[in-house]
Image: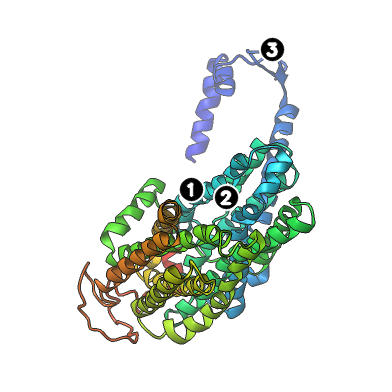
Amino acid sequence: MTDEKIESAREADEESNPESDHQHRGRGIPQPANGKSQDSSDGNTADGHDLADISTANGSQTREWSVIHRLWNWKPKPARYDPENPPKFTIWLNVLFGFASCFTVSNLYYNQAILNRIAETFSVSFERASSVATLMQAGYAGGLLLLCPLGDIFPRRPFILALVGFTATIWLALCLTTSFPLFSTISFLTGFTTVTPQLMLPLVGDLAPPHRRASSLAVVVSGLSLGILVARILSGVMASYTDWRNIYWFGFAVQYLVWGLLYVWMPDYPSKNPAGMNYLRMLASIVYLLVTEPLLLQASLVAFLLSAVFTSFWTTLSFLLSSPPFGYSSVVVGLFGLIGVVVILAAPVYSRLVIDKVVPLFSAVMGLTVELAGVAIGTFTGSFHVAGPVVQAVAIDIGVQFTQIANRAAIYGIQPSARNRVNTAYMAAAFSGQLTGTAVGNRLYALGGWVYSGSCSIAFIGLALVVCLLRGPRETGWVGWSGGWAIRRDDLPSGRKGSGIEAPTELPERALVKTARIVEEGG
């Protein structure tokens, strides 16, 4: 009734004042007698048919975007998420994540064995060609810091698929380009987006039950370690018998294979932060976690020291083995990398039998003890007998693998909603350790040879043991052993902070999903 009165008043006003007609219809723009509107800017006219065409075009564009949106969000049946029946974390899904980690982290290491061939192809010095490896590692470091924390905001499935798909697509330029500056730029970009393994690890921490977390993480960590070895060996062999770009074509194909497998089988797990989070605050929270979570700081310091030992050994080993009394070729030196395969393959078994059943600190101390003994033997016998470096390589792999798995199993119990940021803090410490180990190891080897660099590694491992022993497995503060010395795990009912064991009183996943929906609807 009110609308009818308004319309009657409008008609009466138009009859008494005809000029108001163009004010209502054209918002102040005069209307020609033929019913067409005059565009004052260019004199073009538009009748009702033109407006209909524009509306049709807009509708067509909307439908096209709708189709693209539906295609992008369409998921195969195995990947669909049902909050009433969440997908189970099976061994096959665990192996898929390990496979994906293996052949995505390989991107970072294909170039290391073929830098001389890259220098020849692009007619640049070896020093300039080696910048390709540096740029890719620098890109990876940037991705760790800037991309990995986004796993705490975005749903992991589309985020991981986008990263793998983008990396695989721009990887094609590395297979084809004849420009060294472009090759270097794309190497940096692919390094920046090759962070899938560091998104997989926190995801496994989310999905695996606490009593299987260590063994599930071990599968992915082993895949990551195998990827490094596979990349170096494959690239060296293929470059020896074929064109070096074939290893890049292999990487291009296997990345799309990974993308396809993840597209079909990776479930669409919901975001852990449905209410959203400010990106800058999220980055600042990484530092906050380091200064407020004693367990994370303890694990990060150990990771820094062990990474320094690892890279110091492998960067100076080539100098030792290629010099008297050994004088081995680069091929033989490269085969030393195969020593760690047995340790890598044994890590999931050891994790299931030992790390899953004892407190993580015990596994870390055991790994460090074995590593300390092996490095001491290798340091003081390696200068005159090849058995020394072999023992040292095995011991370092044992220490790094077992300590790393134990540390990750512990830190992923700190804050379930911040596991990607926790992982970023941990990996930042490990990456800094790698840079430190490379620089310090090379410097000490130049000053005093194998014994000098090895002695520094012994000191680093000893310091790591001190860091471990300063804080017990159940201590909630920064230093001390409150809570007891028991080795076997005991699930604390209150989920005490710093225990490294997730509280069984956590909200069920179904309740978390319902809470996420309420937040989204309310927002």
Residue 397 visible? The answer is yes
**The quarter of the displayed image where residue 338 is located:** bottom right
Residues at marks 1 and 2, CA–CA distance in whole angstroms: 8 Å
Mark 3, residue position: 43
As drawn, 414 above or below 163: below
Residues at marks 1 and 3, CA–CA distance in whole angstroms: 54 Å
As drawn, 441 above or below 184: below
Mark 1, residue position: 142
Q: Where is residue 92 shown, x and y percent of the image?
A: 62, 77
Judge the density around disc 2: few (<14), some (14-19), many (≥20) Cα neighbours within 10 Å: many
Q: Where is residue 58 shown, x and y percent of the image?
A: 68, 37
**The quarter of the displayed image where residue 407 is located:** bottom left
Mark 1 vs 3: CB contact within 8 A: no
Q: Residue at x 43, y 62 (%)?
A: 307
Residue 404 visible? The answer is no
Mark 1 vs 2: CB contact within 8 A: yes
Q: Amino acid at mark 2?
A: Gly
